[in-house]
Amino acid sequence: MIRHINIAAHSLAPYGDAGSLLKLNSESWEFLPWKKFQVNLFRLQKRVYKAVRAGDLQKLILRSQAARFLAIRQVTQLNAGKKTAGVDGKLALTFKERFELEEELRLKANNWKHKGLREIPIPKKDGTKRILKVPTISDRAWQCLAKYALEPAHEATFHAQSYGFRTGRSTHDAQKKLFHNLRSQSNGIQKRVIELDIKKCFDRINHSSIMENLIAPSGLKLGIFRCLKAGTNVGFPEQGTPQGGVASPLLANIALNGIEDIHNSIRYADDMVFILKPEDDANKILDQVKEFLAVRGMEISERKTKLTATTDGFDFLGWNFRIQKNGKFRSRPSADNYKSFRKKAKLIINNSNYGATVKAQKLAPVVRGWRNYHRYCKMDGARNSLYFMQKRAFKVFNREKKQNRHTSKKLLKQAFPSVPYSENKFVNVKENKSPYDGDLVYWSMRNSKLYDNETSKALKRQNHSCAACGLKLTGNEKVHLHHVDGNHHNWSHDNLVAIHKSCHQYVHMSKSSAIRS
């Protein structure tokens, strides 16, 4: 039986005057009709996707109160970088400030002026630094609103073999597509791969190439243009999309869309591989790629771009792909990916500030996340099974005076949760399918299959819907497993329901809210 949150539906009053704003608080924010907002926004996005004419339809999203509130919630509550401050120093917004921001978006969405960007250097594995340019919270909210309007229109035009930063697609789609192209039935043993690296892709994208291909009304185009100009360097005033912006990945996809038509390829954002048959001319393909990128102000990194035989193996998206001598396709975690994960785990295990119990709690999500990412790889062997890492963790746990070998083993099981792997069993998204095409049954069932164990069972019982809001699982929002009675040790079926991450937050935010049959 599908369960739901028992929250009274509150009508939305205008929030324009200062007196009413003073009355707005956390309760007012919580009781907003989020389910209705999502339904309204999705309805508009479907219309944009089907029309592909953008224009007036995209204006409807910019004018939509539902879209504005959802954009604010996305950047202040759901995004991973929600606590990152911009140039104004604001780390978070109060509930009153969120309502004020909604009013500001209502008045200025069609003539939005971006503030400056805060630059944060991020070290790369080759020793260089990537400059992350973070907008203010209000700018991120506008970009999210713009993304709501732009995404469905461009989803209708994007290539089927583009998987990065697209709703309903993931790295696992790219992994499975490689399997289809390189397995023994496809004669993968005789094929070669061009590992393409675009030099400073996000920093060098020509603004004109983005603006020319942008499907948007004039007001939205002006806002995007100002967004691009806010992230430029002095030496390159006409290039670059700021890394750290909500809309930046979408803008990069718009600029690079069409490169897949040059030759059989798989693209995830700016990471790309071309798959060559024995008769294909690699130099000709690279010349065409160079010509395509030159128009967009970009160029190939000659040092990192290489032609590789599939039998020699190549790295892509954190995996190493190789065709064995018997023609069998294999994918494993890459050496760099494993080293990065091991470094994170070692920092926790060897940290003297934590006790064994805290270490186990901190290790669990790191290990689970890594194993989930590689769940469609071949994960046997001492390295991928984390045998030596677990051995080291057990020694550290057992050293504590409060622990013995029995309690240490329990903590070890908690710290290294098992995740079943099924090699190459991921099911690809159907060619040009998009969540905006309105096929709710397909997308809710597909998204349910991304989960396993108790979460998967709960979603099946709930007919692939959220137990709190009742919405189908059509978007990218994660699903959490909720214990109805609040007892996390009670794992009976009746006590477990699957709900959206945001719904989970609101359940625990309010004492009055409850999930009931």
Image (cartoon, rainbow, N blue to C red):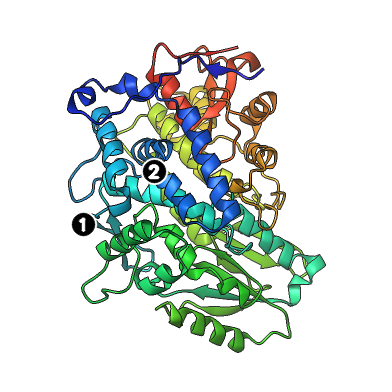
Work out whether mark 2 precedes mark 1 in sequence or the reverse, and give the earlier one.
Answer: 2
Residue matched to label 2:
63
Q: What is the quadrant of residue 116 in the picture?
A: bottom left
Q: Nearer the viewer, mark 2 or mark 1?
A: 2
Label 2: few (<14), some (14–19) or many (≥20) C-alpha neighbours in 10 Å = some
Q: Is residue 212 above or below residue 350?
A: below
Residue at the spot x=39%, y=43% of the render? Answer: 63
Quadrant of image for the N terminus: top right
Residue at the spot x=64%, y=62% of the render? Answer: 160
User: Depth check: 155 or 44 in front?
Assistant: 44
User: Depth check: 399 or 296 in front?
Assistant: 296
Residue matched to label 1:
116
Q: Which residue in the rendered view is the most extreme toward the right?
A: 185
Q: Which amino acid does label 2 sit on?
A: Arg
- Indicate the secondary structure of the residue bearing disc 2: helix
User: Depth check: 335 or 283 in front?
Assistant: 283
Label 1: few (<14), some (14–19) or many (≥20) C-alpha neighbours in 10 Å = some
Q: What is the quadrant of residue 400 in the picture?
A: top left
- Measured in 3D between alpha carbons, the distance from the residue under mark 2 to the one under mark 1, in whole angstroms, is 25 Å
Quadrant of image for the C terminus: top right
Q: Where is residue 103 in the image (x, y as percent from the top left)?
A: 28, 37
Q: Can residue 476 be seen in this view?
A: no
Q: Which amino acid does label 1 sit on?
A: Gly
Q: Is residue 241 left or right of residue 33?
A: left
Q: Is residue 59 left or right of residue 13?
A: right
Q: What is the quadrant of residue 91 in the picture?
A: top left
Q: Position of residue 509 (x, y in %)?
A: 38, 20
Q: Can residue 376 be seen in this view?
A: yes
Disc number at residue 429? none
Q: Is residue 373 above or below residue 157?
A: above
Q: In this view, does 497 lie above or below 253?
A: above
Q: Position of residue 226 (x, y in %)?
A: 28, 61
